[in-house]
Image (cartoon, rainbow, N blue to C red):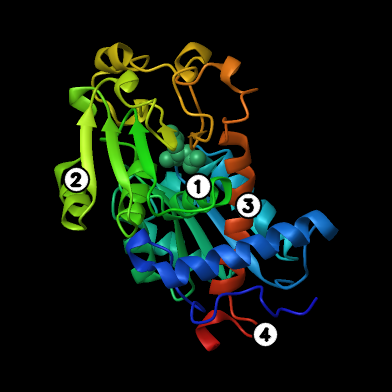
């Protein structure tokens, strides 16, 4: 398969650490390539453009979608994967190896490293140690840039535009890294944002200020019923249990919001409900059959966007990225 149109020029060797790296022009190109990846997957399952390339997937935190979609993306492009996902406890990490040493080891085998880690800033630390591209698959409550890219792709794909939309983010806006990355990314567009959370899970002030400084209309409320009738996108999130030191507090908050078919009656016909998943009760399964429930389509888009990113950061012909 010819590689024409299956990579974004100028991204070779780039780390993917934060959504701040992406401006609208580059986003458009990533999304165009993701669309082509979708067509190729539908027509013939994949393309062989990453044959001989190896991805190391290093996950220090649980993951289903992010790890599986990176693995699927790599395999559908003809590459292969070293998965260190289920059992970091079975690797040398459990012997006390430092993150830079683990990274310097994996880059001896792999051409790209995908990292999920519980500490904010870990992806940046790994990238500083690595000579191959590092992709941040979630650094604690910091960022989750590839999720935000697939979220934005989904919004555009479902609704046909970004400018002029009203997006409400619901749930754990304090610890939810997908919300942090998506807020930063949406701040580049002309959107209205409403943040819906209990007081204790409000969006961090620096992010709120970033959105305001970018000129966005921003509002906060704790009541989802206040906004559901006015939104184009309802982005629902799980309360991030693993970030709580006080589990009693988590128990109090975990079911603060539940999206039900009754609540959906108040929403517009032309709107979508999104969720990065996993859900643990925030959206009733009875909502799944509603055509506005976009969360499983969102999952599939993740693979197309990650195919586009992998094809773009890995060098096109021969050689490792440090020789490109
Ligand atoms: C999210 C994450 O890990 O931040 N999951 C995902 O990657 N799709 C959301 C979450 O765990 O709540």
In the displayed structure, 136 sits above or below 266; it is below
Residue at the spot 62% in from the left edge and 61% down from the top edge: 34
Mark 4 neighbour class, 10 Å CA radius: few under 14, some 14 to 19, many 20 or more: few
Which residue sits at x=48%, y=53%?
Answer: 161
Evaluate if marks 3 and 4 touch, with contact meaning CB atoms under 8 Å apart: no
Label 3, label 1: how many angstroms apart (C-alpha)? 15 Å
Q: Is residue 18 visible?
A: no
Q: Which residue is mark 4?
A: 317
Please name the residue that numbered disc 3 is placed on. Answer: 303
Nearer the camera: disc 2 or disc 1: 1
Say which of 163 and 58 sits in front.
163
- Element under disc 2: helix
Q: Quadrant of the C terminus?
A: bottom right
Q: Secondary structure at mark 4?
A: loop
Nearest to viewer (mark 4 / mark 1): 1
Report the front residue among 27 and 119: 27
Tag of residue 208? 2
Image-quarter location of ligand 1 = top left
Q: Does label 2 or label 3 sit earlier along the sequence?
A: 2
Q: How far apart are the two marked residues, 2 and 3, measured between alpha carbons? A: 30 Å
The reply to whether the residue tagged 1 has its Cβ within 8 angstroms of ligand 1 is: no
């Amino acid at each position: 398969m010819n590689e024409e149109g299956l990579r974004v020029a100028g991204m070779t060797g780039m780390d993917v650490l934060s959504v701040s790296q992406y401006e609208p022009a580059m986003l458009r190109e990533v999304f165009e390539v993701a669309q082509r990846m979708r067509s190729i997957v539908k027509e013939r399952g994949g393309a062989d453009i990453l044959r001989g390339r190896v991805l190391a997937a290093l996950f220090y935190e649980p993951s289903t979608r992010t790890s599986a979609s990176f693995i699927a993306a790599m395999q559908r492009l003809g590459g292969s994967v070293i998965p260190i996902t289920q059992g970091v406890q079975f690797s040398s990490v459990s012997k006390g190896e430092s993150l830079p040493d683990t990274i310097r080891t994996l880059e001896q085998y792999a051409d790209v490293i995908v990292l999920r880690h519980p500490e904010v800033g870990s992806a940046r630390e790994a990238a500083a140690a690595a000579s191959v591209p590092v992709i941040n698959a979630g650094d604690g409550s910091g960022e989750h840039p590839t999720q935000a890219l697939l979220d934005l792709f989904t919004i555009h794909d479902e609704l046909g535009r970004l400018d002029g939309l009203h997006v409400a983010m619901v749930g754990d806006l304090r610890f939810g890294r997908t919300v942090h990355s998506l807020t930063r990314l949406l701040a580049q567009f002309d959107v209205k944002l409403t943040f819906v959370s209990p007081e204790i899970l409000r969006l961090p002030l620096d992010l709120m200020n970033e959105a305001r400084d970018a000129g966005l209309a921003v509002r906060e409320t704790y009541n989802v019923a206040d906004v559901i009738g006015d939104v184009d996108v309802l982005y629902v999130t799980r309360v991030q249990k693993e970030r709580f030191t006080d589990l009693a507090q988590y128990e109090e908050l975990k079911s603060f919001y539940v999206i039900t078919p009754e609540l959906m009656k108040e929403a517009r016909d032309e709107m979508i409900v999104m969720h990065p998943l996993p859900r643990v009760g925030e959206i009733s399964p009875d909502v799944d059959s509603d055509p506005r429930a976009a969360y499983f389509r969102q999952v599939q888009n993740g693979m197309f966007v990650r195919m586009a990113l992998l094809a773009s950061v890995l060098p096109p012909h021969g050689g490792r990225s440090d020789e490109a």
